[in-house]
Image (cartoon, rainbow, N blue to C red):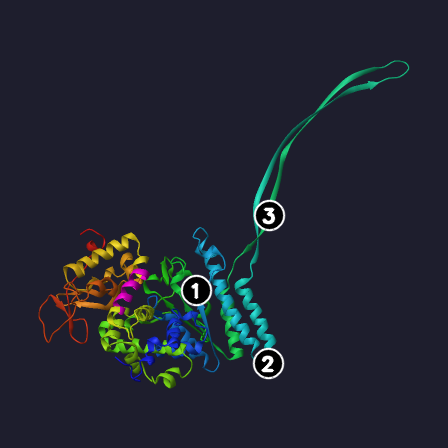
Amino acid sequence: MVPRGGDETSFLLRDKVFNRAVSNILQRSERQRDADKLVDIYVDVGIVPQLENNNNQIIYGRRGTGKTHIFKVLQKKFEEEEGTSAIYIDCRVLGSTAQFSDDTYPMSVRCLALFRDFMTIVHNELLNLITHSSSADAEKVFDLLYRLSNAFSVDREKIVKEEMVVVEKNKLAYSAGLEGSFDLAGGALKPTLGGAAESGKDVTERFKINLADKVIFGDIHYYVKEILSILQYKLVLLVDEWSSLPLDIQPYFSEFIKRSFFANELVVVKIASLEYRSEFNVSFKGGILGFEPGADISIALDIDDYYVYDRNPDQISNLFLDIIYRHIKSELPQGYFETIKGIHSSRMFAWDVFTTDKVYNELARAAEGVVRDLINIFTNAFFDTVRRSRDRIDQRSILEAARGWFEKDKNEALDIPLRDLLSKIINEVIGHRSARSFLLPNELQKHPSIQKLFDLRVLHLVQRGYADKDNPGKRYNIYTLDYGTYVDLLKTSRQPRDYVAIENSNDGDWIVPFDDKRRIRRIVLTSEFIDGNV
């Protein structure tokens, strides 16, 4: 098959410049130093417009779904607004000492170590704004900034009694001598004996000066608001990798952020996290500590919901194709695609890279809605094709790349109990039911093993809250097994057959989870099954 140009030397996969561009695709957005590139390669599916506002918000998404990329694009867009400064804060770099992760320290000590690093980033950004500001009140603002630093970083002296030493005394003294008179006429001497007793206590008290940690939330709120008011700026805090913080400290850290910033209309807080690794509040006798989602901060969206292949395969295939096209284009010399190769769109790119449309559809399906998996599978398939001296990526390369990526990135991350559970699910769903999807009661979505399999991207959430018509009070989530768990079965008699097109069905053994009226056999995994009691 000859490329569109008619010359075999113009095959993209034989082009060294193109090969280098594929190799240079960055796997993580934080590795990209050029913010303009991140904006250029981002393909929006309606997520950014929901976040480009002044609301405090939380967004969820598993690792690799693009949370960091979205925040980087959002930072760029906010900074294009007049009088707006956006700070990207990666929670993985917070905690200047080991105290915050060491549960042998008191919670107050751990949280303060974390919060001080957080506030230092905010302080430095405010200093940067002041330095580049033309405000006539520069001296006043610098004084406010100094006072702000005292509100979160200066220890207070506290005199503490360290010990009291008591020494008891019981003393008895004796004296002896001769007493009398003597003269020339005669005299006499007589002996004398005397004694004295002494008793009592010596009390010694010792004191020391302790440095008592203290954060004054009222001062932080006041000084930040005053500084921003004088500078006429709005501050947006984009807090990423929230789930990297220890779970027990998250509610307290949430409370610190809420008390410092939520009452300030000039500060906006947006947080990106993994849903099942987030604890934003904790209940105690006096109320709730931390954020109250819905009251203090809104849950904006779950990125996973936007990339579910089974809901709209054609749309997701085209979306993922455009993502790959933009990533490669950003690594090529400017105009290379258009002027050298005559490629002006992702569809034209697909004609020169894949053997058929079905191949890049299979790539999108293999990615299971995770952009990082998409890029890795594509890159591996690309260089496998080059190694085999083929001109275009075929389905074999996609299958081999998907299998390799699953084994290397996902299966290796599973411990023995998780591997055993996954094997059990695979055997039941694929082996016995010839399917790849199953239903799980809502109450099991927070089961630790299900959460871990979901976080490690070997289970994928397809739809939430399916209502059982035979039991209206019961709700389920629909999960599907990762492509890598059954890739070896494709094109064999054991290939999973989840979806069957129907017009109408009254068969209670089937459900219809998607708008296009495809159906899935009713396979329900119970708590007894998950916990190994079946």
Highlighted magenta segment, given as a residue range: 397-409
Q: How many marks?
A: 3
Which of the two discs, 1 and 3, labels the residue nearer the N terminus?
1
Q: Can I make out residue 363 in this image?
A: yes
Badge 2 element: loop
Question: Which amino acid type is marked by label 2?
Answer: Ala
* Separation of residues labelled 2 and 3 (CA atoms): 48 Å
Crowd band around label 2 with a 10 angstrom C-alpha radius: few (<14), some (14–19), many (20+): few
- Badge 3: few (under 14), some or many (20 or more) residues near its Cα, within 10 Å? few
The residue that label 2 is drawn on is 136
Residue 393 higher or lower than 426, as above or below: below
Front-most of 424 and 267?
424
Q: Amino acid at mark 3?
A: Phe
| Disc 1 residue type (three-letter) | Cys
Whether the magenta-drawn stretch holds residue 398 is answered as yes
Majority secondary structure in the magenta region: helix
> Nearest the camera: 298 or 516?
516
Of callouts 2 and 3, which one flags the residue occurring earlier in the amino acid sequence?
2
Front disc: 2 or 3: 2
- Residue at far top of view: 186
User: Residue 288: horizontal and vertical position, in percent?
Assistant: 37, 62
**Residue 79: numbered disc:** none
Determine the secondary structure under disc 3: strand
Where's residue 291, x and y in %? 38, 66
Residue 385 % position (x, y): 30, 70
Residue, disc 3 = 207
Residue for point 58% across, 42% down: 164
Residue behind mark 1: 91
Q: Is residue 356 magenta?
A: no
**Residue sitting at 29 percent across and 63 percent down?**
404
| Viewer-proximal residue among 4 and 509 | 4
